Structures are given as structure tokens and as C-alpha cells.
């Protein structure tokens, strides 16, 4: 994994992996604007390709690709959470999210 150090990355909480929901989660006490800046940094660190952001009410969505596997990165301001989850190909995506969780030594919840 690329060693990309940036002050915004240090504001993220310890990554957690939910096997049940197939999500890799971070506590993210940042504004939407800061999170928009953080997403490319985090995805570069995880060696993922980040697509363009889609804005929702108190929510941000990005399409993500890891070695041709579609994933989704989402941020919800109300719960201050950023998470990576499988995209359209849920089974393969779940394996990829689990792999990334292992690489970042995520705590299992």
C-alpha cells in the first residue's frame, strides 16, 4: 500500500470491518467539503480508482474500482461515517472489501 501521509488521513478513526454488512468503516468527524478532499487521498492509499462524487442530502457517494472490481465509497454527515462496500457485483466485491480490510488491519465488528 502506498504510504500517503496527509493531515486529513490522520483524522479518520481506526478502520472497522463488518462481515455481516460487508463494509469497511471509518469514523470520519469531518465536514462534507473535507471528506470530498479526503476521499481521493484514502483511495490512493488503498490503491483504488475513485470516480466522480455524487452529492445527496447529507451524503456523498463515489464509484470505486479495485483491480476491475466495482465498489462504492459513501459518507454520511449525520453519523460521521465513511464506508467502503461492494458495488454491483456483491459476491466478488465482498471478497475485495474483506481483502482491503485485512490490508489496513481493520478491527472486526
Image (spheres, rainbow, N blue to C red):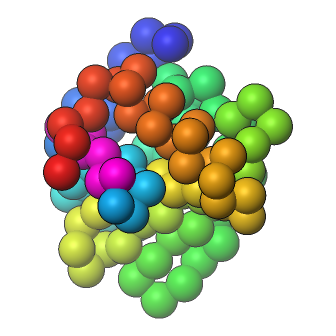
Q: Quick check: 74 above or below 99? A: below
Q: Quick check: 83 above or below 55? A: above
Q: Can residue 25 be spotted in the picture?
A: no
- The residue shown at (75%, 30%) is 67
For this rendering, which residue is in front, 28 or 48? Answer: 48
Q: Quick check: 42 above or below 53? A: above
For this rendering, which residue is in front, 72 or 35? Answer: 72
* Residue 24 drawn at (x, y percent): 38, 48
Q: Which residues are magenta?
A: 14-19
* Residue 87 drawn at (x, y percent): 66, 60
* Residue 34 drawn at (x, y percent): 38, 54
On the rendered structure, is 58 left or right of 36?
A: left
For this rendering, which residue is in front, 25 or 97? Answer: 97
Q: Residue furthest bottom?
A: 57
Quadrant in which residue 12 is drawn: top left
- The residue shown at (51%, 42%) is 97
> Does the magenta segment cover residue 15?
yes
* Residue 35 drawn at (x, y percent): 41, 55
Q: Can residue 59 be spotted in the picture?
A: yes
Count of numbered tags: 0
- The residue shown at (37%, 26%) is 102
- The residue shown at (45%, 38%) is 98
Q: Quick check: 93 above or below 42? A: below
Amino acid at each position: 500500500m502506498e504510504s500517503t501521509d496527509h493531515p486529513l488521513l490522520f483524522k479518520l478513526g481506526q478502520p472497522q470491518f463488518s462481515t455481516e454488512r460487508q463494509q469497511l468503516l471509518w469514523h470520519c468527524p469531518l465536514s462534507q467539503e473535507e471528506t470530498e478532499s479526503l476521499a481521493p487521498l484514502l483511495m490512493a492509499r488503498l490503491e483504488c480508482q475513485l470516480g466522480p462524487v455524487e452529492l445527496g442530502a447529507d451524503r456523498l457517494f463515489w464509484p470505486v474500482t479495485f483491480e476491475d472490481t466495482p465498489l462504492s465509497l459513501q459518507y454520511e454527515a449525520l453519523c460521521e461515517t465513511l464506508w467502503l462496500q461492494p458495488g454491483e457485483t456483491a459476491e466478488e466485491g465482498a471478497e475485495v472489501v474483506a481483502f482491503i480490510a485485512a490490508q489496513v488491519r481493520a478491527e472486526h465488528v
